[in-house]
Amino acid sequence: MRAVAAVSAYLRPGDALILALTLVLIGTLWANRGTRGDGVVVRRGGEVFLATDLRLNRLISVPGPLGNTLVEIHAGQVRILSDPSPRQLCVRQGWLAPGDNAICLPNRVSVERGHSGHDSINY
C-alpha cells in the first residue's frame, strides 16, 4: 500500500487519463493480433476472381484457358488442390503460409494468402 500511495502522489488526473487510454489501446491491439494474413485473394487473368477469409471451409473452382483450377480452403489454410497445368508446380507448393503466393501460369490463376507487408524487395 505504501508503494501505491507513493506513486499516486506523483500522478495528476491527466496522467491517469493517458495511462487508461494507453491500456485500452494495448488491449485492443492484443485482441486483434493475428488477424493480418487471414484473407485469401484468388486471381484469374490478373483480375480478382474472389477475395475471402480463411474461416470458411470451401472449394473454389476457378475457370482458366486450360480448364478449372480447384482452390481449397480448410482449417484456416489455403492451397491449390488441382490444376490442369502440365507440370503441377502450383499444386506441389502445398499449403500456403501468410504472405505466400501460388501461381499457375499456364492456366493464368493465382492465389495469395494474406499480405507480406512488402510492395517490392530491393537488393
Image (cartoon, grey):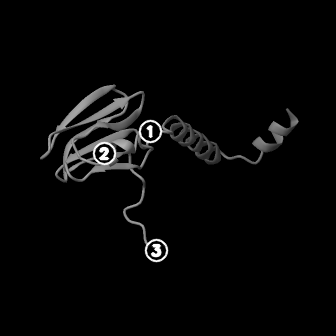
Give the quarter of the image for residue 53: top left
Kindly state the secondary structure of the residue where label 3 is placed: loop
Percent position (x, y) of residue 105?
24, 53
Please give the residue where the numbered disc 2 appears in the rendered image: 88
Kindly state the secondary structure of the residue where label 1 is placed: loop
3 or 47: which is nearer to us?
A: 47
Q: What residue type is labelled 1?
A: Thr
Please give the residue where the numbered disc 3 appears in the rendered image: 123
Percent position (x, y) of residue 7?
79, 43
Q: Which of marks 1 and 2 is nearer the N terminus?
A: 1
Q: What residue type is labelled 3?
A: Tyr
Please give the residue where the numbered disc 1 appears in the rendered image: 35
- Say if mark 3 contacts mark 2, CB within 8 Å: no
Kindly state the secondary structure of the residue where label 2 is placed: loop
23 or 29: which is nearer to us?
A: 29
Percent position (x, y) of residue 70?
25, 35
User: How far apart in space, not on screen, are marks 3 and 1 (Cα)?
Assistant: 30 Å
